[in-house]
Amino acid sequence: MTQLLDANSYPNQDEIELYEDGMGYALRMATANGLTFSELARTFASPGHCYIPARASGALALMFGCTPARLQRAFVARYFREGHHTARFLTLEFLRPYHLRQNVPQICPLCIEIYKKAKASWSISIITCCTEHKTQLLDRCGCGRKLSWRRPSIDFCECGSRLASTDQKCQPASWQELEASNQMEFLLGQVRFRLAGSERTLACFDGVTADTFARLVWAFGVVEDDQKRDFPTSSNPISLAQARNNLLNWLAASPRAVRAACDSSTDFRFLLEVAGDARPRNLASTPLDLRPLIDTATYHQAVMRHYRTDNREHHALVDARAYRKGWLAWMAAKNMRSSR
Ligand SMILES: [Zn+2]
Ligand SMILES: [Zn+2]
C-alpha cells in the first residue's frame, strides 16, 4: 500500500477535467502509469471489487497529481442521514442513491473516441444519451459484456474491442431522452456550462434541483416511451407497503435459510430497504457476491443464453433468472472440476 501510494512512482500526472468522472479518472490514470484498475480497487476496497470507494479520492489525487477537491466531488459519496441513504455527487445531494450509477458505468463511444475520458454525467441514471452526439449511451460492449471499470483501459473492453464508434453500434436517441438528459445536464451546472434555451420542452424544470428532477422523471416516467432499457418501468407501480408485504410473504414461504445473490451491494441495500425494520429471520445478513463470477466464461455464457430467450435486460425478474442460470452453470462446472 505505501509503495502504491508513493507519488514518485507515477510519472504520468494529470488534472481531472471538470466534466470527468472520478472513477473514470482513476482508470485513465492507472492505465497511463502501467497499473490496472483491479490493482487500485484491491488497494482501496478489496479483491474482486469493481469500483473504488469515494474515501480513496484523497490518496488517488496524491498519486496522480490532481486537485483533491476536484477529484472528491467526482466520486459518488454515500452516507446515512436522518435514517436514509443519501448520496453526494458533483457537490449536489441526491436523496435516492439509485439515481446514481457510478458503479455500473455507461459510455458514449463517440465521446470516448474524442476525449478518451469518462464523463461524470454518465453516472446519473436519468442521463441515458449523449447530448453532444445525440446517441444512446451504452452499458454493454458489442460482445455482450456489461461495461465495468475493471476493463483494460477507458477505450477498450476485455474482449479486445474498442469502446469507440469503430467497434460499437451507436443508436440515435429519442427526443424524449434527449430532452431529459439535456435538462439534467443543465441542472448539474458545474459539469458543463451551457445556456438554457427557452425552446427546451423541460425548461419549466429549470428551477428545481438535479435530485428533484431525477425523482420527478423517475416517478412519472417522462422518458419511458423509448427508454425501457435503463428504467424500471413506472407504468404499473406498486406501493412500498405492497412491495414489502409481497417480499415478506415470499420470504416467509421460503426455506429456513435464504441468501440473496447480487452483483452490487446497492441491490442488497434496496432489498433491505423494501424489507423495512422487520428483517426476516431466514434472510442471511450478507449477500452472495456474484461479481467474481462475472468474468468467468461459464457464468457469462449461461447469462447471455438466458437473455437470448428473454431480452428484457434490466427487468429485475429477467435479470434474476439470468443470474440464477449463470450461478447454476458455474456451480455445476465447479462440482465437475472437484469430482475429477
Ligand atoms: Zn458523445
Ligand atoms: Zn467486449
Image: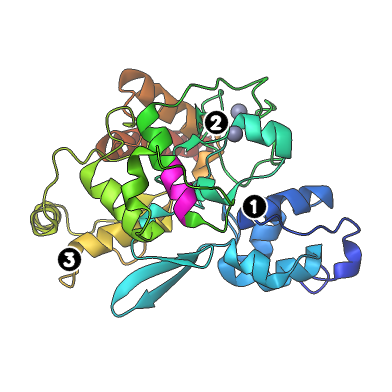
Decide which of tag 3 and tag 1 comes sooner along the chain. 1
Instruction: Please name whichever residue, 34 or 337, is drawn nearer the observer in this view of the structure.
Output: 34
Q: Position of residue 308 (x, y in %)?
A: 37, 19
Q: Which residue is mark 1?
A: 20
Q: In the rendered image, which quarter is residue 274 located in? A: bottom left
Q: Amino acid at mark 2?
A: Ala
- Kind of residue at disc 1: Glu
Depth order, front residue of 63/173 = 173
Magenta segment boundaries in residue numbering? 182-187
Which residue lies at the image location 83% right of the left edge and 70% below the top edge? 3
Q: CA distance from mark 3 to mark 2?
A: 34 Å
Q: Quadrant of ligand 2?
A: top right
Q: Is residue 244 above or below residue 163?
A: below
Q: Which residue is mark 3?
A: 280
Amino acid beneath label 3: Pro
Q: Residue at x 19, y 63 (%)?
A: 275
Dot 3 or dot 2: first in sequence order is 3
Q: Is residue 24 above or below residue 55?
A: above
Disc 1 vs disc 2: Cβ atoms closer than 8 Å? no
Q: Is disc 2 surrounded by few (<14), some (14 to 19) or many (20+) residues within 10 Å?
A: few
Whether residue 128 is visible = yes
On the image, numbered disc 2 is attached to which residue? Answer: 297
User: From the viewer's perspective, is 272 left or right of 166?
Assistant: left
**What residue do we see at 21% from left, 41% from top?**
234
> Is 208 situated above or below 114?
below
* Helix, strand or loop for disc 2: helix
Indicate the position of residue 168 as horizontal and vertical percent values: 60, 22
Query: Residue 184 placed where, x, y %?
Result: 43, 49
Of marks 3 and 1, the one in the foreground? 1
